[in-house]
Image: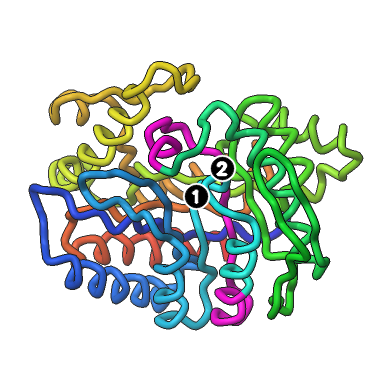
Amino acid sequence: MTGRLTFSYLYDFRNPAPWRRDPEALYAETLDVIAETEALGFDGAFVPEHHLADDGYMPSPLVTLAAVAARTRRMRIGTGIALGPLYEPLRFAEDCAVLDILSGGRLQLGLAIGYRAREYAAHGLDFTKRGARFDVFLHLLRRLWDGESVDHEDRFFTLGRAQVSPLSCRRQIPLYIGGFAPKAMERVARYGDGYFGNAEVWPLYRQKLEEQGKDPAQARIWLQGLMLVVAHDKVAAMEELAPYFHHVSNSYGAWMNEDKAIGLEGAVLRPMDLDAFKASGILQILTPEEAVAHFRHLRETAPVEQFTMAMPPGLPAERFLAYAGIFAREVLPHFQ
């Protein structure tokens, strides 16, 4: 496997009830943390998207990324992920072009269709048509970033002489598209610059690239490990960190099971108590040596080029940075 493996963090800007703070202070502190991780040597800062969350899970990633762009100079910034079908193509294409200009060409987009029917209902959209809507969205996005004047009308979007100005100097901003099913992987191979998901899907992704006439040797995979932390004392780290990651796990578990019509078969997360969470293995705490071996193994099994971890909501900034510092000093050098 050639090339670097880069590392980054996801920031969801949540404000859970047990550790609730003034939102302005929380946002300002999180931006400070992002700047500190750039100084530590991390390669990226990414922001996800969800709506209707009681804990304030970030609903507006592009606005937030403009602030991140102003606080950083080198690292990539982007969505991880944005819910593509919820957007209108021209507005999204314009906002991303401006954001790429503001950041000096550092924007990278992770996009997927999402799994919460409630989010689509809140936006007045048909959840069952999100895949088809996403395909049209991606097709139009590519055309708009090519500088075309686009006339288009279908059941999802109507555009009349739509054109993006100004365009980013790169025009086509990198798109990493998520999914797991064969249809989703066809979408990744057709429209994506890379795949956002898990390494186990690599054989299917490779197959779909070949079917599209694309070279699998050029494949790019971006993984998230939102429950992975590196620490010297694994027992102590579990005691300190478990309450924060427990909140994350339970909130995702509740969403995955809130509507049995979502079609998310095989959802592995279920709400559980703290002791059950600690024993579940969901929170993966590795020593630096174990982490180096883990990431080397990933690189042997799939063309992984990026790995994103997470700052759990509620954890004090100084404690998060202490763990990030261990990773920066004892894991990053092995992959640079």
Q: Which residue is depicted at the point 63% across and 53% down?
A: 305
Residue at 58% over, 58% down: 109
- Residue 73's place in the image compared with 317, above or below, is below
Q: Check residue 179 for magenta coloring.
A: no
The quarter in which the C terminus is drawn is bottom right
Q: Amino acid at mark 1?
A: Ile
**What residue sits 41% from the left and 52% below the top?**
309
Image side of residue 336 versus residue 242, left or right: right
Q: Does residue 302 lie above or below 102 as drawn?
A: above
Q: Is residue 193 above or below residue 171?
A: above
Q: Is residue 16 or residue 298 the one in the foreground?
A: 16
Q: Position of residue 94 (x, y in %)?
A: 62, 69
Residue drawn at x 73%, y 42% is 154
**Amino acid type of the residue tagged 2 in the rendering:** Ala
* Label 1 crowd (10 A; few <14 / some 14-19 / many >=20): many
In this figure, which residue is indicated by the disc labeled 2?
A: 112
- For residue 102, which numbered disc appears in the image? none
Q: Based on the displayed image, in which of its 4 quarters is residue 184 positioned?
A: top right
Query: Can residue 220 be seen here?
Result: no
Q: Position of residue 222 (x, y in %)?
A: 59, 49
The answer to the question of whether label 2 and label 1 lie on touching residues, with beta carbons closer than 8 A, is yes
The answer to which of 207 and 137 lies nearer the viewer is 137
Query: In the image, which residues are magenta?
Result: 98-122
Side of 301 relative to 75 (left or right): right
In the picture, measured across the screen, residue 21 lies left or right of residue 73, that is left
Whether the magenta-drawn stretch holds residue 118 is answered as yes
For disc 1, the marked residue is 81
